[in-house]
Amino acid sequence: METTALAAEADDEVLREVILSVSAELDRIWDDELSPPAVSAPLYHLTGRLCGCDDPFLPVKVKYTQEALRLLPDVEARILSAPDPFAAAVRTAIAGNVIDFGTGGHSGEAGEGGFKLEDILEEFLEKPLFMDNIRELKDRAEKAGTILVIGDNAGETVFDRPLLKMLKSAAVVYAARDVPIINDATVKDARLAGVQNEARLVSSGSRMPGIVLEDCSAPFRKLFEEADVIIAKGQGNFETLTELCQDGRIFMLFSVKCPVAAHHLGASMGDMMVMQW
């Protein structure tokens, strides 16, 4: 939560209040049965209230979205020239998943002590997949009537667009967050990224950095139940959706970002996942 408070430009007094209040709240709500996103969500919202800022990462979300939009034409051209454009689009969508300030791994500005999106895209187009269910995803997507894509981080949404274009044989719905939390994409953030040009853009109704159906709106829950294929972006969605069901129609696209998830999956930090669930 300290990173969130600093993003909100909290002074030392407010930062101390955040640390003490979050610690007390964590003690109150802790439950071993809760997923990490379910535990962290109220702590992020509490931090925002104490700092008087409900979207402290807004400037950096806009920056990365604009940077990704600048790169998009070259990225799309490269995908279309790849030996397997669908696989390249999937890899590009995973590459965007590194734009994440909830893990503490990339808190700088692109090209200014942070990370360069061009370098990451280059790496992820060639990097081996730890779990590779791309063929299964493509086969299911080609037969699907409705595909629900659950987005993750702002900026990353731009790099989801090439994959969305390749799903045009189905009705594609893209769900973003209802309210700001960390740098997860809200509907407003996703609209800035141009997602509405490739899919029907909706709110999940969720206030969490993941999907807990009880926290989502009734329309989203209906979409979730009726979709033929669900593509879920990011580790937060992985951590929550794997607790819901395992019927083969969910595909998790993410980069492993924490040691606990790596251990659970038998993977290493930074491994790329296309996991059917």
Image: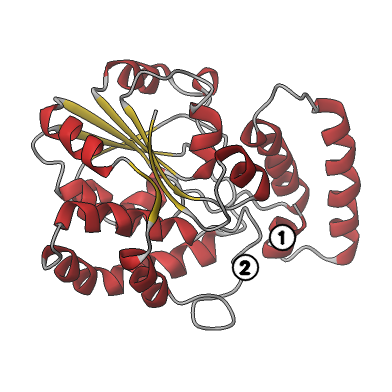
- Quarter residue 40 falls in: top right
Provide the secondary structure element on which disc 1 rests.
helix
Is residue 155 visible to the viewer in this orientation of the structure?
A: no
Taking 224 as reference, is 206 left or right?
right
Percent across and percent down for residue 111 are 49, 82
Give, as a three-letter code, the residue at label 1: Thr
The part of the image, by quadrant, that contains residue 169 is top left
Q: Which residue does the numbered mark 2 point to in the structure image?
A: 107
Residue at 44% x, 64% y is 62
Quarter where residue 261 is shown: top right
| Residue type at tag 2 | Ser
Q: Residue furthest front?
A: 266
Give how far across and how far down residue 88 sits, in percent: 23, 58
Q: Is residue 55 visible?
A: yes
Q: In the rendered view, tell whether residue 113 sits above or below residue 87.
A: below
Near-viewer residue (257 or 72): 257
The reply, left or right, for residue 190 in relation to residue 2 is: left
**The residue tagged with tag 2: helix, strand or loop?**
loop
> Which residue occupies 30% across, 25% down?
249
Q: In the depicted view, which residue is nearer to us: 71 or 228?
A: 228
Report if the CB atoms under discs 1 and 2 are less than 8 Å apart: yes
User: As drawn, which residue projects farthest toward the bottom?
Assistant: 112
Quadrant the C terminus occupies: top left
Give the mark, 1 or 2, whose residue is nearer the N terminus. 1
- Identify the residue position indicated by label 1 in the image: 3
Query: In the visual, does 243 lie left or right of 133?
Result: right
Q: Residue at x 14, y 70 (%)?
A: 77
- Say which of 145 and 158 sits in front: 145
**Where residue 63 appears, x then y in whole percent?**
45, 70
